[in-house]
Image (tube, grey):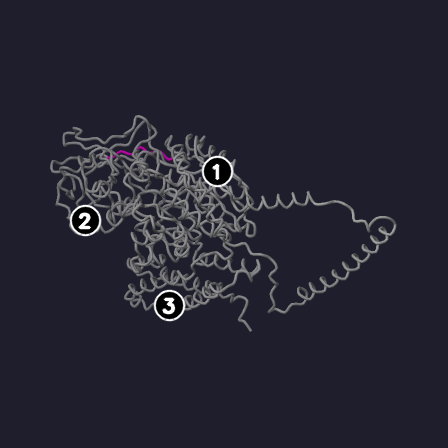
Amino acid sequence: MPTKGKYIAGKQVSRWDAESEKVDIEYKNLDNASTSKLSFFSGQKGCALKLLLLAACLAVGMIVGYVIRRNVHDVFLPPSHKETVPHRQEIQDFDDNLRLLIQQDLNDANNFDDHIRKKTEFVHLSGVGYTNRFIKYVREMWGTFRFDSIDLRKYGVTLSYPNYTNPNSVVLRAPNSTVIMETHSNMSNVHPEYMPFNAFSPALAVKGKLVYANYGTKEDFEELNLVHINVTGKIVIVKYGKIHAANKVRHAQDNKAAGVIFYSDPVDFAHNQSSLAGHTWWLPGWAVQLYHVRHNLIGDPLTPGYSAINGVYRTQPSVDCYPKIPAQPISYNDAAELMRDMGGPIAPNKWFGGLNITYRLGPGHQDDRTVELTVNNKNDKRNISNLIAVIEGKYEKDKYVIVGAHVDSWTKGAVDAGSGYAVIWELARAFTSKVEKGWRPRRSILFALWDATKYGHIGSFEWVQEYEKQLLTGAVAYINLDAVIRGNYSFSAEASPLLYSLIKTAASQVPCVDPDYHDMSVLQMWTRKFPDLTNSSQPRIFPLEGDSDHSPFYYYLGVPAFSPAYTFNVKLYKNLPTYPAYSTLEDTIDYLQVFIDPKMELHETVSKVVSDVLLRLADSAIIPFDIQSYIGIFENGKKYLQTLKSVFLVANVNLDTLVSRIDDFIKTINTFSSNITNIDVSKLNEYDIQHLNHKLIQVPRVFITDKGLPGQPQYRNILISPLPEDLNTPQVFPGIAAALKDVLSDQNWLPMKQQISYIIIALQQATDLLSDRILGESL
């Protein structure tokens, strides 16, 4: 139970308080009014007057009723097809006063501190006791808020765990079998449940010569081939960073390596310092970072294409679901010992890291040492739980704005997942406090706590699959709160283009807490520090990555998504993929408060920006999507097609129809956007509003294909989806990019022509949707 902080809202005087006081005054005045009888209504004459007055009132009432009924019939019974229903009610729309009240309620730093301290008491590994009890605790606490419903959604899924009685190991042996070095299996006596592993790595023992493969990208393995370094049967050691860990294992497997060893090089995670003095923001040499190495992130692999609820059939996982070779992470101290005396050519300069060694490619060591990699991980079916709390909408109950954060972690996880958990808790408290005072949003707001996110967003994916039909028609947007305070340099955002304008508007309404920019808004500071590459007057918004809880919403269903964060200077630390202590035992509340957010001001700032975005999405009469953002996407798409011009010429593939459809869609977007901009909301009725909003919600869904992308069924968005070579890098027209492999390998053009056809059809459907073409041409 939290011990301090403002958990009961209402200290400030809101406009609902003021209205209730006025009502009390009015009733009080009525109670004090004179009740004395008038003299001319007394006696027999008075009774006669009363009867005459009553008769007159009845006659007038009948006449008025007849006139009203005739007018109603005149309006509603025989209207022409050009007439509209008169506007007869006030339209609920975004209220800036309400925004200010909600943001004022997010100013208590003690609340954020309490939530994170509670969250970091234990290691919350999915599917085990601590996490299950913690989710129940949150449900009990949120039960005191004014939600319309709170529900636990349970799923039986396959998770991966280290073997606590037989730990994983990496051993370096001399030719005479003497052990030269062995990695440490557990770095904490306080948390025996923590043990270094790569989730979903198969349990295998392999041995062989060591090869250094830089970051393990596709290009890195190609470069090894160019210098005649054969990795077949070898164990490759790679640095974390650049691309997703699962892709590194996939590339090693494709090149027939025997296994993979991961480490976090100090050039990336310690600012190129091989040894650190004392406790710093940078990653210490003993720390080990944990990642999963699944490639196809389709939720529970035993229930492909449907949710893992009770009673459904479980099947065997597909052959490409899990990696076939073992993988294990080690510290960079151990990596230095492992790589110190490697043989072979010296690595290229750009491959050098921050270890105090000479980086060589191998294979093997100068004295014929052997590396033994032993992984004893276990896959186990476990029950996980998502917590879904709902504020029902007043006018559009079946339209949902969803905000989510995950609760699971492989370590204490103050930044990941504590910061996002604290923010969603405070948002839930602030919004339900306004419901308590009489407000209700136009659309429903769902607050979600996800389980098993660290395993490849399994919890959110299972929920999306369970409610796919409702979400396809009703989900407006998803806001993802994942490691939201990972640095103190600047506000930052990853988002779908439809939300760009909305996010910038919200950031312009929140004051900056940076003392060097105290007179600016968050938007102004953000623009100064992260200007857009093509327009320096606007901030840069990054594309969404492929492995977080926004992924099933955006890439599987087409729901626009937004992932906010306060982050570090990515221009200065170009190779740092995230904050240095990510997924290590260093990620504690002390780390967070000493090196990132001592006063919890950044938590407050992000909460206020998100609250503005959330309120505008839930309460604006017309959903504030920037439909013109599609223009930039398709312009980039046309540029991408130009890069493949020579390939298309070889097979005589004509792109004229595709380009023409793109141009038609852009014209329709401009017309639709202009019409919405000039609309006077006060003159609309609810039908008009919901008709417009239906179009805005459905346009992104048009670009979703049921089949999924070639080789990546977890991604169904044919407009933008992650690259097969890197789950964290998006690709425009990803189906065409995936089909290109078939063209280059065996000249099979059928998949390419199908992908082009899908885009042509989707563009036609999107154009028809925005222009109501199914209703025919206007007369």
The answer to whether one can see residue 723 in this image is no
Q: Locate residue 106 relative to residue 353 in the image: left or right.
A: right
Q: Which of marks 2 and 1 is in front?
A: 1
Earlier-in-chain disc, 1 versus 3 = 1
Q: Residue flagged by tag 3: what amino acid is it?
A: Val
Q: Callout 3: 10 Å neighbours few (<14), some, many (20+)?
A: some
Q: Give the range drawn in magenta.
A: 373-379
* Element carrying mark 3: helix
Q: In which quarter of the image is the N terminus?
A: top left
- Residue labelled with disc 1: 154
Q: Position of residue 25 (x, y in %)?
A: 62, 44
Q: Where is residue 668 in the image (x, y as percent from the top left)?
A: 45, 67
Q: In which quarter of the image is residue 628?
A: bottom left
Q: Distance between the residues labelled 1 and 3?
A: 46 Å
In the drawing, what numbered circle is on residue 224?
2
Q: Locate residue 296 relative to residue 365 in the image: left or right.
A: right
Earlier-in-chain disc, 2 versus 3 = 2
> Magenta includes 374?
yes
Q: Nearer the viewer, mark 2 or mark 3?
A: 3
